[in-house]
Amino acid sequence: MKISIKKLELAKARACMSTNDIIAAGIPKGTYNRITTVKSAKPDTIGKIARILNVDVTELLED
């Protein structure tokens, strides 16, 4: 699934969370870095990030 880095950054800002906070919450650093580089991830990984940021998955996907 394609993830919007802009939307991800906005969700992080709204949640007052940094990349390190997301990694500490259970997303491996390598996985997070790959997501931000490739702009794609497995649905379950995007779901986990959405749960950490307390947003709906659709808020992180590209239009």
Image (cartoon, grey):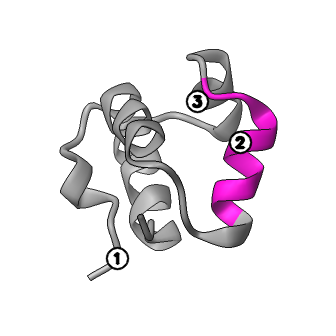
On screen, residue 28 versus residue 30, left or right, reads: left
The residue depicted at 56 percent of the width and 17 percent of the height is: 25
Dominant secondary structure, magenta = helix
Residue beneath disc 3: 22
Q: Position of residue 15 (x, y in %)?
A: 37, 36
Q: Amino acid at mark 1?
A: Glu
Q: Position of residue 21 (x, y in %)?
A: 61, 25
User: Which comes sooner in the sequence, label 2 or label 3?
Assistant: 3
40 and 20: which is toward the camera? 40
Residue 25's place in the image compared with 23, above or below, is above
Q: Position of residue 18 (x, y in %)?
A: 61, 37
Secondary structure of the residue carrying tag 3 is helix
Which span of residues is magenta-colored? 27-36
| Occupied quadrant, residue 63 | bottom left
Residue that lies at the very extreme toward the bottom in this rendered image: 63
Q: Counting other residues with Cα less than 10 Å from the Cα at mark 3, is it few (<14), some (14-19), or many (20 or more)?
A: some
Q: Position of residue 34 (x, y in %)?
A: 74, 55
Residue beneath disc 2: 31
Q: Amino acid at mark 2?
A: Thr
Q: Counting other residues with Cα less than 10 Å from the Cα at mark 1, is it few (<14), some (14-19), or many (20 or more)?
A: some
